[in-house]
Amino acid sequence: MVWIRHSSSAKLLTALPAQQAEITHELLDSLPQDAPMHHIRETLVATGVLPRRHEALAQLELWLTDFADALPPHQARIIRPFAEWQVLRDARRRATRHRYTAGAATGDRVDIRVAAMFLNWLDTQELDLDTVAQKDLDLWLTSPPPEDKESAPSSAGPSSGA
């Protein structure tokens, strides 16, 4: 009874019939992807209510949609094809062979984020991807990411022995 009254998963489970739709992966995909949602989805798959799917790949695809939607349009026009044709194509191929893991999905998210970071860097340098030169790439590769620049002074704290 405590679980039913206080659990986020239980509240989500009781709210699903109010959607007035068949419970499918697509319905669950349209809801916030948080821990209670993942728990409910795993339970519905384990009990046979939903068919098994390659969850790491499906979550990567959902994440990519949200990530690309949040980008400026000129960056999304570059990131979406890169992610679809390079990252997701390889992920789908590996998933069909059952060789795609949650760790691989994490690595793929990193690859996509780094590509977006590069595009952000180009914007801050007022450079165009069409005209970027090797010296520009070398500068980007040898420059610390903006987060590192901001946190550099505080990194000389107790853990660095200072």
Image (spheres, rainbow, N blue to C red):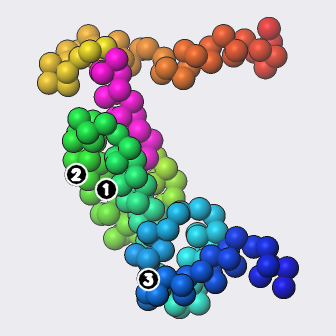
Query: What secondary structure is found at the residue carrying circle 3?
Result: loop
Residues marked 2 and 3 touching at CB (< 8 Å): no
* Rendered position, 128 above or below 96: above
Tell me the tag on residue 88: 1
According to the image, label 2 marks what residue? 85
Of residue 132 and residue 74, the one placed in the foreground of this image is 74
Image height check: is 16 above or below 81?
A: below
Segment colored magenta: 108-124
Q: Amino acid at mark 1?
A: Leu
Query: Is residue 161 left or right of 61 when viewed as pictured?
Result: right
Q: Residues within 10 Å of mark 1 (few under 14, many from 20)?
A: some
Instruction: Give the crowd class for mark 2: few <14, some 14-19, many >=20 residues within 10 Å.
Output: few
Q: State which quarter of the image contains the C terminus.
A: top right
Image quarter where the N terminus lies is: bottom right
At 35% from the left and 21% from the top, the residue drawn is 121
- Look at 22% across and 51% down and name the residue there: 85
Q: Earlier in the sequence, mark 3 or mark 1?
A: 3
Q: Is residue 5 left or right of residue 13?
A: right
Nearest the viewer among 121 and 10 is: 10
In the rendered image, is residue 12 in sight? Answer: yes
Q: How many callouts does the rendering have?
A: 3
Residue 51: image quadrant is bottom left
Residue 69 % position (x, y): 34, 48
